[in-house]
């Protein structure tokens, strides 16, 4: 186990959690968020560095909050954020109206998509079946 102290920059360069994230996460802005489902059928996310699980309050081994990017696609745990913030030149922003709106919009989009592909299709199938039954009777 680690001592819990903040690792030195030399230690961090050889840290097991680094797997080339500098290429795509440098200078990013993060939002401290409570985890919530951001895609259909998606019940958890993982820290991009240490693989800590994020999920709802009652899911067991996961944590309910962390740093997420604007689209809630990438997540960081508190510890990894603290350890790598300097190396990656990260910033933290407050969840503003724009961010909230983009999330609401995204959820609405997949709900509509879900409805169109699932609910709508099955309803049409049911109607077809009914029509066929009627046709057979008549
Ligand atoms: Zn982590």
Image (cartoon, rainbow, N blue to C red):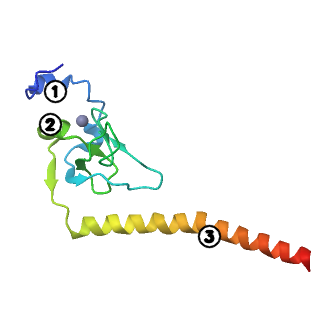
Indicate which disc, 1 or 2, sits on the residue closer to the N terminus: 1
- The percent position of residue 61, horizontal first and vertical second, equals 31, 36
Q: Residue at label 2? A: 87
Residue topped by disc 3: 120
Which residue in the protein does label 1 denote?
12
Q: Is residue 85 left or right of residue 132?
A: left
Disc on the earlier residue, 2 or 3: 2
Query: How packed is label 1: few (under 14 Cα within 10 Å), some, or many (20 or more)?
Result: some
Coordinates of residue 36 in the picture (x, y in percent): 33, 54
Category of crowding for the residue at label 2, using alpha-carbon neighbours closer than 10 angstroms: few (below 14), some (14–19), many (at least 20): few
- Tell me whether circle 1 and circle 2 mark residues in contact (CB < 8 Å): yes
Task: Kindly report the distance in space between the C-alpha atoms of the residues bearing marks 3 and 1.
Answer: 51 Å
Within 8 Å: ligand 1 and the Cβ of disc 2?
no
Q: Which label lies toward us, 3 or 1?
A: 3
Picture quadrant where residue 51 is located: top left
Q: Secondary structure at mark 2?
A: helix
Residue closest to the eye, 126 or 71: 126
> Is 10 on the left-hand or right-hand side of 38?
left
| 75 left or right of 31 in image | right
Q: Residue at x 57, y 68 (%)?
A: 116
Classify residue 43 as left or right of residue 58: right
Marks 1 and 2, how far apart at CA: 9 Å
In the displayed image of the protein, which residue is found farthest to the top? 1
SS label for mark 3: helix
Quadrant location, the N terminus: top left
| Label 1 residue near ligand 1, CB within 8 Å | no
């Amino acid at each position: 186990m680690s001592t819990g102290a903040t690792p030195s920059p030399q230690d961090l360069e050889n840290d097991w959690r680094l797997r080339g994230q500098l290429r795509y996460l440098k200078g990013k802005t993060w939002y401290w968020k409570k985890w919530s489902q951001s895609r259909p059928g998606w019940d958890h996310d993982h820290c991009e560095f240490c693989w800590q699980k994020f999920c709802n309050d009652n899911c067991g081994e996961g944590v309910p909050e962390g740093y997420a990017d604007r689209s809630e696609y990438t997540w960081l745990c508190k510890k990894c954020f603290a350890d790598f913030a300097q190396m990656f030149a990260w910033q933290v922003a407050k969840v503003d109206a724009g961010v909230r709106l983009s999330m609401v919009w995204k959820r609405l989009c997949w709900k509509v998509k879900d409805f169109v592909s699932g609910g709508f299709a099955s309803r049409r199938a049911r109607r077809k079946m009914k029509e066929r039954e009627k046709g057979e009777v008549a």
